[in-house]
Amino acid sequence: MIDFSNGSVFKLNPCDPQEVYPQISPFLLQGEQIIFSFKAVRDFVVFTDKRLIAANVQGITGSKTDFTSLPYSKIQAFSVETAGSLDRDTELDLWYSGLGKVRLEFKRNVDIRQLSLMIATYVL
């Protein structure tokens, strides 16, 4: 499983869902829709209407990938941190029952408020 407590694992930028769809489609339930997708160099995170799916591409060749599925139904709390003048990244912290805190870091150009509203829609 991905070490979500290490924020440097992901420095995510928005990406077109079609860019990651071929890799993630085998894991989607029938009717499950991608809402947001973000990508680092090789790793990516997809927010669907049911869960967060994080993909950690491993090894030099990238032929091995760890997919972690985190359902919104297990989120107990969440927080967002907007970018500041010195700290240019935004952060999303999710507290999961049985797992603890999951932290994702995004580049400044991510609308973290919109992401927060989406999570609130499915959690609250």
Image (cartoon, rainbow, N blue to C red):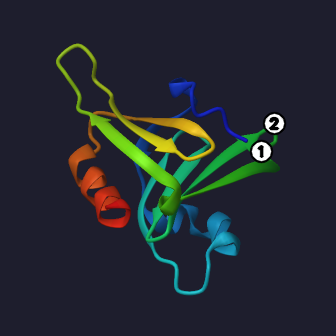
Residue occupying the point 68% across, 70% down: 27
Residue occupying the point 17% across, 17% down: 85
Instruction: Give percent across and percent down for residue 76.
Output: 44, 48
Where residue 57 sits, quadrant-wise, is: top right
Question: The disc labelled 1 sits on which kind of residue?
Answer: Gly
Pointer 2 local density, CA inside 10 Å: few below 14, some 14–19, many at least 20: few
Q: Residue furthest bottom?
A: 31
Instruction: Give percent across and percent down for residue 28.
Output: 62, 74
Residue occupying the point 82% across, 50% down: 63
Q: Looking at the image, which is closer to me, 119 or 30?
A: 119
Residue occupying the point 47% across, 76% down: 33
Is residue 72 depicted above or below 55 in this figure?
below
Report the disc number at residue 59.
2
Q: Looking at the image, which is closer to me, 5 or 47?
A: 5
Q: Looking at the image, which is closer to me, 99 or 90?
A: 99
Q: Do the residues bearing badges 2 and 1 touch, measured as CB atoms within 8 Å? A: yes
Q: Is 124 on the left-hand or right-hand side of 73?
A: left
Per the image, label 1 sits on a secondary structure element best described as loop
Instruction: Give percent across and percent down for residue 86.
Output: 23, 13
Q: Is 36 on the left-hand or right-hand side of 73?
A: left
Question: The disc labelled 2 sits on which kind of residue?
Answer: Gly
Is residue 50 depicted above or below 43 in this figure?
below
Residues at marks 2 and 1, CA–CA distance in whole angstroms: 5 Å
Is residue 2 depicted above or below 63 in this figure?
above
Per the image, label 2 sits on a secondary structure element best described as loop
Instruction: Give percent across and percent down for residue 90.
Output: 31, 32
Residue that carries the numbered disc 1 in the rendered image: 62
Where the C terminus falls, by quadrant? bottom left
